[in-house]
Structure formats: structure tokens, C-alpha cells
Amino acid sequence: MTENIFEKIIKKEIPADIIYEDDLVLAFNDISPQAPTHILVIPKKNIPKLSDSKNEDKDLLGTLLLTAKKIAKDNNINNYRLVINNGSEAGQTVFHLHIHILAGRDFGWPPG
Ligand code: 5GP
């Protein structure tokens, strides 16, 4: 299977502006930011989309959320929106699970 762009970023085959990294998780700035802060938090494990995750991924999914919270706190961001697009009709374009952290402007509801 061909590697998608996030797998190449994990392997450092292409550059990214990395915000946070540990054994399980990588976070980097979005290349096309939709808000003043737009960070992507991804697992290093290859899970194409949230609906592909399994019960065994429970700890990893919790770790992703806690990492998003930590990144926000470490950057003094108190108000933010987390987004997971699941599937192309929901707006997913890169098929490696990721959480968007968006902050720095007002957000409408319902989302577009
Ligand atoms: P999705 O639409 O799948 O929820 O989000 C994918 C995100 O990945 C988009 O916001 C897009 O701008 C970002 N993205 C796509 N290619 C790259 C890349 O090569 N580097 C970085 N840093 N972000 C990317």
C-alpha cells in the first residue's frame, strides 16, 4: 500500500513543523491553516480513520485527546475546537486518523 502524506511525515521522509512528538503521537502545524492556530495530532499507528479504530485502540485514542489538551495548555490556548473528519463526505482528505486543533478566532455553529 502506498504511504500517505502523514505516514511520510512520521518517517521524516517529508518535513513538517513539528509541535510535539513521543513514542505514540506526533503533532505538527497544518500546511493550510484554517485558523490562527491549526495543529494536527496524529497517532504513529496507521489507523486510516476513526471508524477503523478498534477496542484495543482505546488507550491510544485517549492519549490523542490528552495530547491535544496538553498542546493547547502548553501554548496558553484556553478556547479551541477539536475536529475529526471521518470519511470523504465529512471532509476527510488524508486517510490517517488525525485531530485538528483550531484556535485563535471565533467559530460558528453548526459547522459548515
Ligand atoms: P482532513 O481534511 O483529512 O480532515 O485534514 C487533512 C489536513 O491535512 C488538511 O487540513 C490539510 O491542510 C493538511 N495537510 C495535507 N497535506 C499536508 C502536508 O503535507 N503537511 C501538513 N503539515 N499538513 C497537510
Image (cartoon, helix red, strand yellow):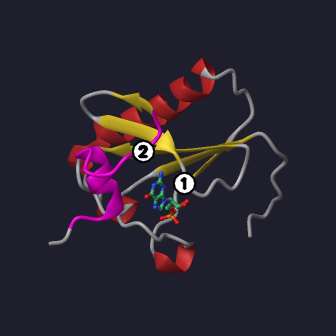
Q: Amino acid at mark 2?
A: Ala
84 magenta-colored: no
Q: Are marks 1 and 2 in contact (CB under 8 Å)?
A: yes
- What is the number of the mark on residue 31? 1
5 versus 105 height, above or below:
below
Question: Does residue 45 appear left or right of residue 16 in this picture?
Answer: left
User: Does the magenta portion include 10?
Assistant: yes
Which element type, helix, strand or loop, lies under badge 2?
loop
Residue sitting at x 30%, y 42%? 58
Q: Sort mark 1 into few (<14), some (14-19) or many (20+) by Cα contacts within 10 Å.
A: few
Which amino acid type corresponds to the residue marked 1 in the rendered image?
Ile
- Stretch of the chain drawn in magenta: 3-18
Tell me residue 14's x, y (percent). 32, 51
Q: CA gap, disc 1 to disc 2?
A: 8 Å
Kindly tell me whether mark 1's CB lies below 8 Å from ligand 1. yes
Tell whether 12 sits left or right of 97: left
Identify which residue is drawn at 63% across, 23% down: 75
Beta carbon of the mark 2 residue lies under 8 A of ligand 1: yes
* In this picture, residue 51 sits left or right of residue 71: left
| Quadrant where the image shows the C terminus | bottom right
Residue 64: x and y in percent read 41, 38
Residue 78: quarter of image: top right
Name the quarter where the N terminus is drawn: bottom left
Residue at the extreme bottom: 89
Which numbered circle lies on residue 16?
2
Tag 1, which secondary structure? loop
* Residue at x 24% of width, y 55% of height: 46
- x%, y% of residue 22? 30, 27
Label 2 crowd bin: few (<14), some (14–19), many (20+), radius 10 Å: some
Query: Where is residue 77, by image quadrant?
Result: top right
Name the residue rendered at 27%, 55% in the picture: 7
User: x, y (%) of residue 48?
Assistant: 31, 63
